[in-house]
Amino acid sequence: MLKVLLLEDSQNTIVTLEKEIKKTFDNIEVLVARTYKEALKNILKHGEDINLALLKHNILHRSDATLLDVLDVNNIKSIIICHDIENIPTDLVFEQDSVIDCIIQYDELEIKNIVNAASRFLKNIHKNILIVEDSKIQLSVLTKILEKMNLNVTAAHDGLEALEIIKNSDKKFELILTDYNMPNMDGMELTLKIRAKYDKDEVGIIILSSNNEPEISVQFLKMGANDFINKPYNETEVLTRINSNLDLIELFTKTKDMANRDFLTGAYNRRYFFETSNLILKKSRRDKSKIALAMIDIDKFKNINDTYGHDVGDKVICDVVNVLKNHLRASDLMARFGGEEFCVMLDNISHEDTIKTFEKIRKSFEENIIKTQEYTISCTVSIGIYYGMDEELDKMLKISDQGLYYCKENGRNQIKIST
């Protein structure tokens, strides 16, 4: 669970901030401190388990400056919240390695800016950045800035090394920051090679250059770069541009994810299933492993809609997703095909485990109770399964669909596996 230390003496701000932070993250605990001493107790108790500190600056007087030192020793980064721009303690805020940002809060509207800054920092732990820079000094400066932002940094010293890292690394790089002038392969050629494989909405590219000619930046942008930063680095500019580009990549990802999801259940939709299942089949063929492809249908679903109404029917459909998630691996593909029908693909699974898995799923539905404000109902499912490997996905789907039809015609609430 994430932990955020909040040093704040205004009860209204505490309530609002705590509410907004918890709205952004499901797995977060806000440790509230109204004084320096309370903050220190929380740091001593939780130590490095605290992921971020939000500190009101007028509680952080010079006599209490040691609090930032304690945060620094415990490797805890902090955001300073200021209510008066003229009294910002610049000697504390900008000279302490533990301080990553300072936000001016004139009124309650700025709460959103504080939450956004905290959210970005906490999310950055899962973000991977590749820096391509042949200068050790410049690399060190940039790495320090990015690590202060909670980002995971990987370094390459030229374009060729960068391409090898991208090809062989298990990491997914959200952003690539590349120098322009480098030996072996410069930033322009590297940009072209990356863009041949990845679009702008998949990987962002920021060019780093001391060349002040405007046509250079324009040329890079035409070749597919997302942004351009001039050397020497201004830390505030670097922070702003990187955060903006990460936000944009995240927005692209969310938009694509929404397009791939079923609106009602949040499960993947039919289109996404066909796009992704072919990748799974390709991997399974290469590994010479078997897959299980199952069609799952709610028994007598029309009766549920007719008896209880479509709102209850929608709840039953959503409950199917919850039950399936409880029994499937994170790597398994599950999609709503339409209506009350779902399709599941499991790779690298034995015939025996396939039967066990889907029998558990069937039994879970049989025992599952769905409660609404007015009704308590239950439902069963029929499951047709194809097990093996075939060159044609359509053939596998047809066989699993035939198995589903067999279940429906022979009493429902059962599984039928075919090869």
Image (cartoon, helix red, strand yellow):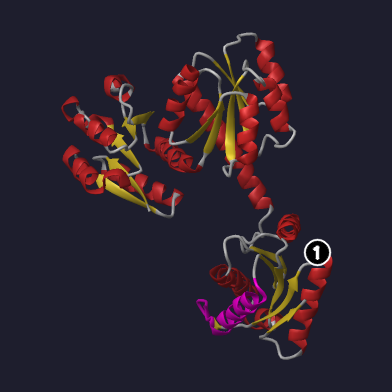
Predominant SS along the magenta part: helix
In the displayed structure, would residue 217 be above or below residue 353? Answer: above
Q: Which residue lies at the image location 33% right of the left edge and 32% below the top edge?
A: 81
Question: Percent x, y for residue 288?
Answer: 73, 62
Residue 34 in view of the camera: no
Question: In the rendered view, does 87 fall on the left or right side of 380?
Answer: left
- Compared across the picture, whether 130 is left or right of 224 comes to left
Q: Nearer the viewer, residue 36 or 356?
A: 356
* Residue type, label 1: Leu
Determine which quarter of the picture holds residue 165.
top right
Say whether residue 19 is magenta.
Answer: no
Q: Which residue is mark 1?
A: 393
Q: Which residues are magenta?
A: 350-375
Q: Secondary structure at mark 1?
A: helix
Of 393 and 239, nearer the camera is 393
- Residue drawn at point x = 58 percent, y = 79 percent: 360
Q: Is residue 8 above or below residue 286?
A: above
Above or below, 182 against 224 in this view is above
Looking at the image, the residue that sits furthest to the top is 213
Q: Quadrant of residue 245?
A: top right
